[in-house]
Image (cartoon, helix red, strand yellow):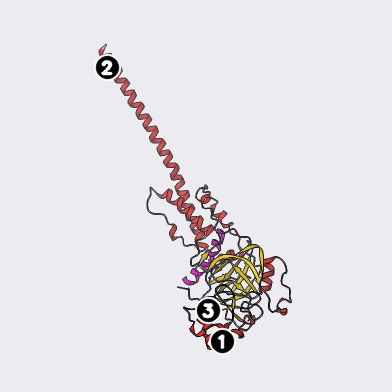
Amino acid sequence: MEKQKKIIIASLIVVFLLGLTFLNYNKVGYWFKNTSFFSQEEPFKKELLSELKTYADSIGIDTSRYTLADNLDATELQADTLIRRLVLEIKYGKKVTGLLQNKIPEQVDSATIFTAPLGKNLVDSLKKGNAFTPYAQLVAHYDRLRGSASDDTLRQIRKTLNFYRWLNRFELDRFIVVNIPAAELNVYDDQGKRLMPMQVIAGSKKNATPLFTTYLTDIIAYPYWNVPQGIAVKELLPKIQQNPGFLDSQNLEILDKREKVVDPESIDWESLSATNFPYRIRQTSGCHNSLGLIKFNLDGPGAIYMHDTNARNLFEMSTDRWRSHGCMRLEKPVEFANYLLGETKFDEGFYNRCLIDQKPSSFKLPKKYPVFVIYNLVDVNAEGRLVFYRDVYGQLV
């Protein structure tokens, strides 16, 4: 009997051990099954990353930053992360550098990009994602030149392509772009159609127009020119000290700290200097005014704005488009003003009447217009042809 009990116990132990082995086998098999699932996903994501990089290369993105590390355990996660980061750059570009200010809020949907499922048609969908015409035209030029153009040329095209992708960060319907090297202003719609092209005169190399984003908010007819203090003390004060009649010849007024006009003959000009000048200089309104008859106010930076000019013949008589103190003189201020206001506030005789003793009149825009002041040395023109511009500020390094 004792012997029979031992046999039964031994049998039960054997059965238990066999069952445990079977369970462990199943667990191991399940683990392998799940591992093989990821290993099936891993080649898909690696292939997708490779396909995505090929496309990104063709549109001017440096893909060397999206290379998988030699770490087999992390490859799956790395591929997924790199794909999503690259999609983010394809859609929204990198932040444009060198801006003095960026007042237009960005709307980047990174949450969706980093959580949405990855599909095999990802690249095809991205190819259809940017319908901005100048961008598509520039991509075609870049793809054509990749094997033949110099590194500097390709780098400048890539810079402009990134600018167009960067525009996707903003909710834009119609917006204004001033490209300093081109000395050109364009109003674009959301498909890239040029609605109001014109030449501009921008800042000289010494007085470079800063790069920024902002809003154009209102228009002033018959503006005063409130002379920036730097120009007042460095350029005008020496001329006034040399010849007090200079003020009258230029239609300039002197204002004190209370904004009251001061009689110039009551001022001891010789006692004043760049560090001791408790006044402000203002030019009266009219056709003689340096701002012309129309001023376009911007929401910063500083004393930078767009305006008409009292020397409109410069657009015809000279090709030097970089001669201002930093503001932007416009070739078609009347047409531009009427376009922004959505009605004809200024008729064809506005210039000819050239009224005197006018007080400035302000016109609020129906909606504020986004403005981008940029510095791109390569772009496409209205016909889609590739155009190279002179590096007027010496920014090419």
Q: Is residue 116 magenta?
A: no
59 and 397: which is toward the camera: 397
Quarter of image, res 258: bottom right
Magenta residue span: 151-174
Q: Position of residue 172 (x, y in %)?
A: 61, 60
Residue at label 3?
A: 231
Q: Earlier in the sequence, mark 2 or mark 1?
A: 2
Q: Position of residue 257 (x, y in %)?
A: 55, 73
Type of residue at label 3?
A: Ile
Alpha-carbon neighbours of circle 3 within 10 Å: few (<14), some, or many (≥20)? few
Position of residue 385 relative to residue 167, above or below, is: below
Task: Give the residue drawn at x 44%, y 57%.
Answer: 66
Quarter of image, res 30: top left
Is residue 133 visible in the rendered image? The answer is yes
Task: Give the residue drawn at x 29%, y 20%.
Answer: 10
Position of residue 63 relative to residue 20, above or below, is: below
CA–CA distance in space, label 3 to label 2: 110 Å
Q: Quadrant of the C terminus?
A: bottom left
Checking the image for residue 244, the label placed there is: 1
Type of residue at label 1?
A: Pro
Residue at label 2?
A: 6
